[in-house]
Image (cartoon, helix red, strand yellow):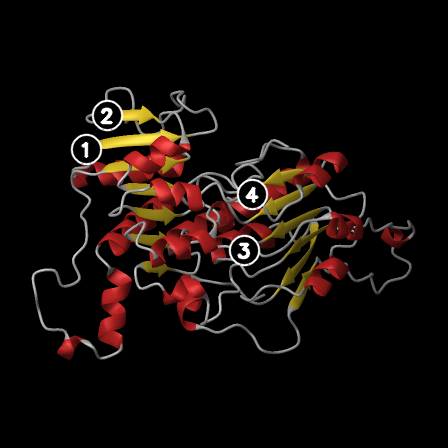
Amino acid sequence: MQRLSQLTLHLSQAPTGNSLATTQSSKPTPPSADHNDPANTNTTLTMAKTKIVVTRQLFDEAQSLLDAQVGELELVQWQSAKPCDRSWLLENAQGATGILVMLTDKVDEELLTAAGDQLKAIASFSVGTDHVDRAALKKRNIRLGYTPTCLTDAVADLTVMLILMAQRRGGESIAAVVKGDWPQMAWHPLLMTGPQIRGTTVGFLGFGRIAQASLHRLLPFGIKRVLYLTSKPGQPVKEDHFGLLKDPSIPIEPATSADQLASESDIVIVGCALTPSTKHIISTDFFSKMKKLAVIVNIARGPVIDTEALVKALDEGQIFGAGLDVIENEPNIQADHPILKQPRCVLVPHIGSATIETRQQMATESVKNLLAGLTGEAMVNELDL
């Protein structure tokens, strides 16, 4: 079985052959050559093995956890680094007791019906679960494992990068060099200038683990104040993940409204979950209240920000810049997309968790969640449906 190691992750390409699925199971013991052997007088019934489906190649450590169960399980695995075909998943899900999916694999009525009533667990290689029909799982008493704690550091690091890129016009500067414009850029005091982090008020939309980890990284930059808005405006959060809230070195306060968050923040960091109530919560009205030198960063889900409104705000100079790890309709962002015409918007292709260490941990945890779901044991992280 092919395995995705650190080396092959960076150096190898996905297989191009037609044999993209591998099924593993233990081989039957050959019968004795001596037909008079008393051991052969009894009939042995072979019980069907528990079937699991895995929709991607995995790192060696995670793969070894699966391989160790081959004697007990029938493993069907998509053998490519590219997303599995929907038709392959629907076909192979039939009879499965557990399925390990990626963020690109839609878990819906169609898949659950194809799998059958014996399906016990879905393990998602992700922190987000908007690709999963949670109501459909709950109706069938199917457990859902996910990986919310693995990527905290990686996404928090990227948050700081996007802030700096948006404030310091990183995308615009790189583009000028790539296009060969640098020799013609006569230096002057305001050339490629932008605001800096020190002395800013940082506003968080959503203030969970990743947001607080981002704050932990921003404090040494000398920010002066923090606002945060949750689903309970004006109320302090209960969870202090990194000991920053008990005796804060700077004011850290709950905002009473989205208007306050928009009007008082120099940096707005979007880190809330995508729900019907948060879709396009950042739109024309929010942007109209932001400061002219403010930047917005989205490390949550694309549809939280109204992209059309963001383009308009950048066009009209309502805000200074934007840094996006996610965007509406990703990954279908073509070269002529309006957001790519905005020099002060930095867009990266949803790479928040893309460190080797994080992806290894996510893979291992996903396998552990899957195996726990088969046996009824506690998952590392299970979403309460």
Cα distance in 3D space between marks 4 and 2: 40 Å
Cα distance in 3D space between marks 3 and 1: 46 Å
Image coordinates of residue 85 in percent, x first then y, are 66, 65
Mark 4 belongs to which amino acid? Answer: Lys
Task: Look at the numbered disc 2 and give the secondary structure of its residue.
Answer: loop
Cα distance in 3D space between marks 3 and 4: 11 Å
Mark 2 belongs to which amino acid? Answer: Pro
Residue drawn 28% across the image and 54% down it: 166
Write down the residue under mark 1: 224
In the rendered view of the protein, which quadrant contains the N terminus?
Answer: bottom right
Cα distance in 3D space between marks 1 and 2: 7 Å
Q: Nearer the viewer, residue 302 or 31?
A: 302
Instruction: Give the numbered dot on residue 63.
Output: 3
Instruction: Give the numbered dot on residue 251.
Output: 2
Quadrant hosting residue 10 = bottom left
Residue drawn 83% across the image and 51% down it: 46
Task: Look at the numbered disc 4 and give the secondary structure of its residue.
Answer: helix
Q: Residues within 10 Å of mark 2 (few under 14, many from 20)?
A: few
Task: Look at the numbered disc 3 and give the secondary structure of its residue.
Answer: helix
Q: Which of marks 2 and 3 is nearer the N terminus?
A: 3
Q: Which of 59 and 45 is in front in this view?
A: 59
Mark 1 belongs to which amino acid? Answer: Lys
Write down the residue under mark 4: 368
Question: Which numbered disc, 4 or 2, marks the residue closer to the eye?
Answer: 2
Image coordinates of residue 382 in percent, x first then y, are 57, 35
Q: Which of marks 1 and 2 is nearer the N terminus?
A: 1
Q: How many marks?
A: 4
